[in-house]
Amino acid sequence: MNHSIHSADRATHLKIVVVALVAGIAVTAFSITARVSSDYSQTAHVVKPTKQITITSSETSTVR
């Protein structure tokens, strides 16, 4: 059993490439199918204030 990738044979390298390719395809397929909506449109919801508010003073300090 080889414990180093440098001394591994061609079949071991091929297995690693195949496993990485299958994992990449699985992640891509999952991310494509995990969409929330299928209509690809986004709508903005406008929130209007109910009443007017006047702020006369603010005693908060800004920390930068």
Image: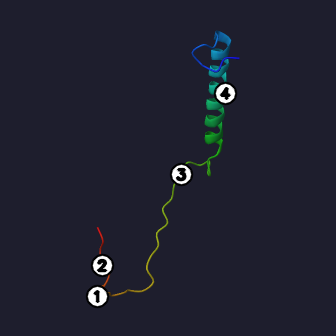
The residues tagged by marks 2 and 4 sit, at their Cα atoms, a distance apart of 54 Å
Decide which of 9, 32 is in the foreground and name it.
9
The image position of residue 29, as x and y in percent, is 65, 36
Q: Earlier in the sequence, mark 4 or mark 1?
A: 4
Q: Residues within 10 Å of mark 4 (few under 14, many from 20)?
A: few
If you read the primary sequence from the N terminus, does the residue marked by circle 4 or circle 3 appear first?
4
Q: Give the residue drawn at x 61%, y 41%.
A: 31
Distance CA(mark 4)–CA(mark 3): 31 Å
Tell me which amino acid carries mark 3: Ser
Q: Earlier in the sequence, mark 1 or mark 3?
A: 3
Q: Earlier in the sequence, mark 3 or mark 2?
A: 3
Q: Split into 4 quadrants, where in the image is the C terminus? A: bottom left
Residue under label 4, please give it.
22
Tag nearer the camera, 3 or 2: 2
Mark seen at residue 3: none
Residue labelled with disc 1:
57
Comparing 11 with 28, the one in front is 11
Q: Position of residue 56 (x, y in %)?
A: 28, 89
Residue 36 at x, y = what percent?
Answer: 62, 51
**SS class, disc 3:** loop
| Mark 2, residue position | 61
Report, in whole angstroms, how far the alpha carbon at label 4 lies from the one at label 1: 61 Å
Query: Which residue carries the number 3 mark?
Result: 41
